[in-house]
Image: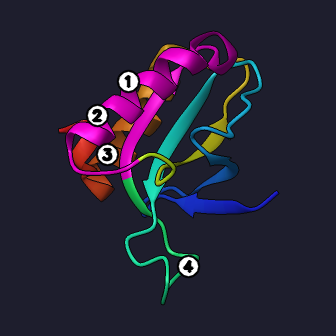
């Protein structure tokens, strides 16, 4: 399984979950990043972040996350199969801890889906 690192002030390792359709979430608290490949032909490993989210339990919210993000992406000109999901697991974390990480990442990357 591949990983990406996000964060400028503090670095966080996100494990790749594959495309949004393929993603099979584990349970537990986490921060997740939704990305796409802006130039899949000449830069196939580069991902552009479109959304950072947080959840107390990925497995319980996976379908709503998948549905809402795919709807937003399609409304904003994307097509199915273009989105990828990456997860930074935070087992035992509080909502405050997850939101703090999420806010840091949003402020550093300014993803369109969080505006």
Residue bounds of the magenta highlight:
50-79
- On the image, numbered disc 3 is attached to which residue? 106
Instruction: Evaluate if marks 3 and 4 touch, with contact meaning CB atoms under 8 Å apart.
Output: no
Q: Is residue 7 above or below residue 21?
A: below
Q: In this view, does 17 lie above or below 6?
A: above
Q: Which of 89 and 26 is in front in this view?
A: 26
Across and down, in percent, residue 111 comes to 28, 50
Secondary-structure class at tag 4: loop
Secondary-structure class at tag 2: helix
Q: Judge from the rendering whether residue 54 lies leftward or rightward of residue 59; answer left or right.
A: left
- Between marks 3 and 4 in the image, the one whose residue lies nearer the viewer: 4
Q: Earlier in the sequence, mark 3 or mark 4?
A: 4
Q: Nearer the viewer, residue 14 or 108?
A: 14
Mark 2 crowdedness (10 Å alpha carbons): few <14, some 14-19, many ≥20: few
For marks 1 and 2, give the CA distance. 6 Å
Name the colour scheme.
rainbow
- On the image, numbered disc 2 is attached to which residue? 72
């Amino acid at each position: 399984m591949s990983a990406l690192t996000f964060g400028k002030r503090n670095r966080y390792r996100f494990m790749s979950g594959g495309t949004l359709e393929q993603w099979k979430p584990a349970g537990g608290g986490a921060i997740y990043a939704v990305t796409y490949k802006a130039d899949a032909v000449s830069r196939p490993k580069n991902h552009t972040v479109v959304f950072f989210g947080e959840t107390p339990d990925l497995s319980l919210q996976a379908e709503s996350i998948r549905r809402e993000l795919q709807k937003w992406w399609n409304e904003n000109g994307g097509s199915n199969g273009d989105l990828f999901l990456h997860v930074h697991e935070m087992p035992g974390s509080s909502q405050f801890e997850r939101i703090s990480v999420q806010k840091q990442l949003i402020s550093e990357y300014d993803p369109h889906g969080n505006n």
